Image (cartoon, helix red, strand yellow):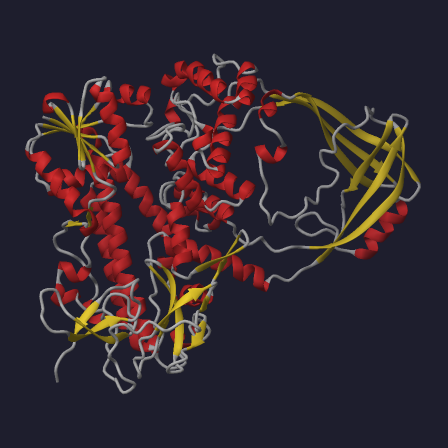
Amino acid sequence: MDTYICEKPSQGADLAKVLAQGKPVSKQKGCIYGSNNSWCVTWGVGHLLELPKPEEFDPERWGSWTLASLPIMPETWRWKVNSRTADQFKLVKEILKKTKTAYIATDFGREGEAIGRSLLDECKFKGQVRRVVLRSLDPKSIEKALSSILGGEATIPLYHSALARSRADYLVGMNLTRLYTVLGQMIGYKETLNIGRVLTPIVNLVVERDLTIKIFVKSPYWTLNTTVTTASGSFIAKWQPEAHCDSEGRCVNAQHAQTIQRALTNATGTIEGAAYEHESEVAPLPFDLTSLQQYANKRWGYTAEQVLGIAQALYETHKVTTYPRTDSRYIPEEQRDDVAQIFTTLASVNPEYAALVNAADALADSRVFNTKKVVEHHAIIPTNNPANFASLSEEEKNIFDAVCRFYIAQFMPVHEYLQTKISVRVNAALLTASGRTPLIAGWKSAFTSAEAIAPKDEEDEADDQSTDNQGSLPRLTTGQACTSSNASLSEKSTAPPRNFTEASLLGAMENISRFVTDERFKKILNETSGIGTPATRAGIIAGGVERNFLTRKGRKLLATEKAFALMSILPAAIKSPSMTAAWEQDLGRVAAGEMSMDAFMVKIMQWISTVTNQLCSMSTELTKKDGLLWTAFANAKPPTVDCPLCAAEMHRIKGSNGYFWACQAEKDKCGKTFNDVKGKPDLGAKASTAGVTGSAKEKDAPFCDECGKPMVLRKGKPNGAKRASSFWSCSGYPTCKCTMPVKKK
């Protein structure tokens, strides 16, 4: 029997429909069988396997959060079945026992490869393995994938890259999170200090930007605009200072600016130069995931995670766009023949698209076709599957519409315009103006406004170049006489860089080399795709917010006091984007078969061991009173409210069912929790006290081994027990469900 392993049930259903070729199938729980059981499609529901926690690898060595137990370095790596999907794993294992050839049909990429291969490894599958390269889930794309199946050996390096990435992330997270959390506990700081290979450098970017803004000192400068009049017409020109300038060419001397203003008042001059160039502009390329997230954040304020979810639904549920987790904005040459059919489909679902398609040329030799720039997945484009607009949400319609318009624009004529540049000399002062006159709309007619083509951030400042691209300017000749009047002098101030938004932070992650000064790393980073991947960047930003390192204010992303404190004590090697991006480059080499997984892991383990051992040896110095950690975390307490029952601090905690407030009492072990209402505890409601037996005199509560929060004493019946007994439960419940037995003295 042939077995196809997909990533999700919907993907499996789409594949089975094509495999069946109209014949009856047997749909069962967790799988679909073809006629005569000749083939079977099953799925993973995401990752059925996960890496065990350190205490599950070795309870004796790593069961407690202590400095002495570090570094955590498993001698033998293994998988653990995800408890939430254990039944599906059991089913897949039984199916594979009857399988001769297994076809990995998960998303074609590093993580998709890991989902399929890890199942085969864990189930000790010994049959033949082949790879179905699924890039889209419409029937035609699936048929094309099934006609060009790869041999299993072709994608083994991709699997090794995924394993190396997950193990490296595990080692960094487990070792450094435990290390800094324990150091924090030694000075009385009770929150978990999460360290992530990608998360930490990104948080540091935001911290450094916020610090730059905080210490920025404004400096005044002066600009001057004047009306220039000629026999051919009038226009606004801007003064270009040639003395008393800063490094940006701005005039910083008020008296000089006032002198120029007087010289330009009702004065005569000449046109020093007038250039008129017929120019053209090609359409912006279709979206990859990052550019789509940036576009949607700027235009509609959608978060990166929200856009990923929408794009995934359009691909997976509605099947109207292609695979979204891509880093390419190009399409392979082989898809030239698909354009006409996609145009026909789009024209059938929207009259506006029909009009645009009529103005486009499906046979146009567009720059979008470039196979060399497509590694795993091509740009996000429409599929041949007609969209049912009635079934799409407003957000889905917005994203789908943008994807369609950017695709159609690739096959429309170029936009043509007349670019005008004028220079004027009046009493030795140089003035300039520029304008752009549209000649042929071309691809720009695919969009309803300039905002629909290139939306701006909410925080974008008004463009200071007020005389640039004014539109049509009069036809002038060099040496032509003119007059200057209404010279307007403005005092302005230099501005700090803007706070990050999700759009600009995504751009920073993709082009991380802009934030690196070391030329060695800068060169490496210029050749990579940045930090993180298109598939993970949204989750990284969301994780920063979730862990109280970042907070949203409108569309701004700001660092919290917790982030400022942690970044101030971390060594550069841990928070540097250079290091993690260099790792990503090595992971790319592993995926390409140019570097072994073992060689990569040796480098990572040596680095983590060195950093961990050095910091552990410095723990006494780091945590002494009024030392580095004391000073850094003095103002890093989370928002608190006094517990109405014991007067200890209560903290707002994110649980599996949303936020709640929990008493953080150390001595009294109150253990009470309250519902969260708009960021505040609902003190009018009855506190949650179910199962709490701790009294105000409890003094022996340990800290949680998993998250570091104080434990509270509770009472309940263990599974199968007849009597209730006391046990320690994490005060971070339900986020953390760790428990400990009460040791008898």
Quadrant location of the C terminus? Answer: bottom left
In the picture provided, is 675 more to the left or to the right than 701? Answer: right
**Please, which residue is most extreme toward the top here?**
363
Res 288 → quadrant: top left
Q: Is residue 663 above or below residue 152?
A: below
Q: Residue at x 33, y 42 (%)?
A: 585
Direction from residue 639 to residue 413 in the image, left or right: right
Point out residue 579 in the picture as x, y percentages from the top left corner: 35, 51
Residue occupying image coordinates x 76% and y 35%:
433
> In the rendered picture of this protein, how many numbered marks are placed on residues?
0
Quadrant in which residue 97 is drawn:
top left
Residue 5 seen in this snapshot: yes
- Work out whether residue 125 can be spotted: no
**Image position of 392 with respect to 358: above or below:** below
Say which residue appears at 43% left-offset and 63% top-offset: 563
Q: Is residue 427 above or below residue 695?
A: above
Which residue is at 28% across, 58% downward?
A: 173
Task: Where is residue 608? Give x, y as percent.
Answer: 26, 58
Q: Quadrant of the N terminus?
A: top left
Q: Along the line of sight, which residue is nearer the eye, 76 or 742? A: 742
In this rendering, the answer to whether 741 lies above or below 507 is: below
Query: Residue 79: x, y in percent?
Result: 15, 49
543 sits to left or right of 678: left
Provide residue 471's location: percent of width, then percent of height: 74, 30
